[in-house]
Amino acid sequence: MLNLGGKNMGKVFSKRLKNLIDVHDVISFDIFDTLIKRNCYKPTDIFEIVEIQYNQTNKNNKIQDFKNIRINAEKNARNKNKNSEDITIDEIYDEININKFDKEKVKKLELETELDLCQINLEFVDILNYCKKQNKKVICVSDMYLCKEIIEKILNKFSIKFDKIYISSEIKKTKLTGNLFKYVLEDLKIDRKEIIHIGDSWKADFISPCKIGIKAFHIKKHSSNFKFIKNKDFYDDISCNIIYSFINNNENKISNYYTKLGYEIVGPLCLDFIFWLYDSVKKDKIKNLLFCARDMKMIQEIFDMYFGNEILNSYFYVSRKSIYLPFLYKKNKFTFFKMLIPVSKRKITICQLFDLCNINFNKEEIEKEILKYKLDYNKKYSYDELISNINFKKFYDNFMLKKIKLFGKQQYSNFLAYVNSLNYNEKTAIVDLGWRGTTQNMMIEITDKDLYGYYFGLNSLNGTNLNKNFKTYLFFENNNCYFEQIYSFMALIELIMSALHGSTISYDDNITPPYVLGNGSNTNNQDIINIQNGTLLFCKDVLNLKKYIYCNKKKLFAENFINIGINPTYKMAKNLGNIYTENIKVRKLCDCKKLLFYMFHPKSLKQDFLDSEWKVGFMKCLFKIKFPYFKLYVILKDKFK
């Protein structure tokens, strides 16, 4: 039995085929697009890939337009050998009369590429196993210019067991004329009623065998297995062509809805990001990468999978809560403290500010102290209210600053020790989701060393010390079309990317490892786990095709990813909306009640909508129907700005 997994064919389809197999002694399979799939959309895409691969190692002697050269050579070879029903790959290359490059080297490269990009058709794993279980004779019959030796290598690569193989280029007879089938009958000394042929070509695999009395079973040549991909304009770009063809050929092995989402959407985006990151790091001559917790855990695993042997990198346990106190100890003026206050419309109490900065406090002590400065212990203040309040500045200078100096000294020392243990003396960069660049900025201030930063995107810079030492993958500030779309579901992106361990709280040089983590979030949410599993599975599966993947096709990958956030299905909005997120307080991503409830409680609707971290998802959960919710979100956002 084959050990390859995969979702079997549709039950009706599979049952019909097995019934036919039961009443025939010899089972004949077409090879390409039946037993074997290529991880590219068209067979001629192989020629374009060969040109790219050849030119990468022969920069002083490049091929141009090899795809058309190769196609025309095959046409010429067939015209020259009209007395023969098929031709060999050697006869094709004899028609390539360009002396600027090594034809034998290119031909070898084409054969290697064919072997690399081929994979078993997962839908036929069960059928092949069934044939073996029923002790049927399995043969392969193919119209193909590749030699028998290469075809056998491809089949053996996937442990496809066969009794005999018939190749048109070797026998000089084709399925299309019917002569190859006649040859098979004579060679096996069997009656035409004893054999059934299975293949994808309507003419060569169905009409032709039927004409000579052989039972045939036709399958679709191309089937779309995509569940989430909306932008399908990827076949013109060879790298995207390979990736999406690979996904289409492999996604049937996954049954879970959210694992598919990770495999099909999140995986390609993360993979493209790490290729962009690798190219940027090499160009900037970075020696050491720090992937920031918790959002970059999965990215670091993928980067390590592909480039870990080339670039030193570590997973960096850091958070706003863990870095604020070391930063404030070093830069304790009110000007710097203002950088830490959330700028969003969500208001915050003074006690929450203490907690945000990781400062130990006594409730009674603060209540008593606050009264001296005519501040309200229970009141929630906006950013503007706090920074413009003279009494709050006095409260900071006379009270909070003492707490910062008291609790910050050891944290500052412990943080520096931890950072230096991560090869920080090398030319270092952090990798993070982004949004404001807070961690990079604070580390520059704390360590007094240059630090580079690589981000998915930055909304605004928190301070001015970053200068030009940063790069963004998708957007920088709100001058990019992706910014507003991604901004509408930032919290969801963080959940999808975030590691399941708790946030870093503080640093302690008396323990190993020298950091303290809080309780993990999302650990009870299987949907997020499945998305991440699907993402990592895709990146692991496609690793063997690494040399055929070329960096930075963000437009396609980003748009398919963004579609999750701005155009979710009801199922997705409902399930992901129920996940808890942390932003000042723990709450659901979109805590949406039923429409009937809001009809009688309109104030609750307004509050729940404003509190929602994913407003498009909230509206989808509420109304359920198809509607351009993102456009409505933009209108509402601008109206209530």
Image: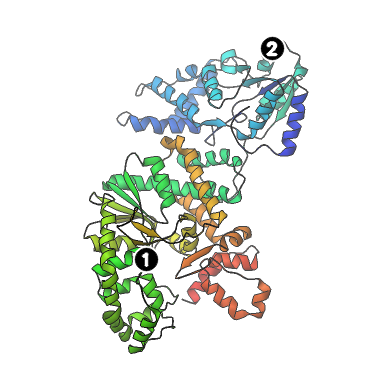
Q: How many marks?
A: 2
Residue ID for mark 1: 321
Frontmost residue, 173 versus 83: 173
Task: List the single residue furthest toward the front.
Answer: 510
Secondary structure type for disc 2: helix
Three-letter amino acid code of the residue under disc 1:
Lys
Secondary structure type for disc 1: helix
Residue 85 horizontal/vertical position (percent): 60, 16
Up the image or down, 620 lies above or below 61; here it is below
The numbered dot on residue 188 is: 2
* Image quadrant where one finds the N terminus: top right
**Mark 2 Cα-neighbour bin, 10 Å: few <14, some 14–19, many ≥20:** few
Frontmost residue, 252 versus 415: 415
Residue 170 horizontal/vertical position (percent): 56, 14
Residue 163 horizontal/vertical position (percent): 63, 17
Residue 83 visible, this angle: no
Residue 408 visible, this angle: yes
Question: In which quarter of the view is residue 13 placed?
Answer: top right
The residues tagged by marks 2 and 1 sit, at their Cα atoms, a distance apart of 75 Å
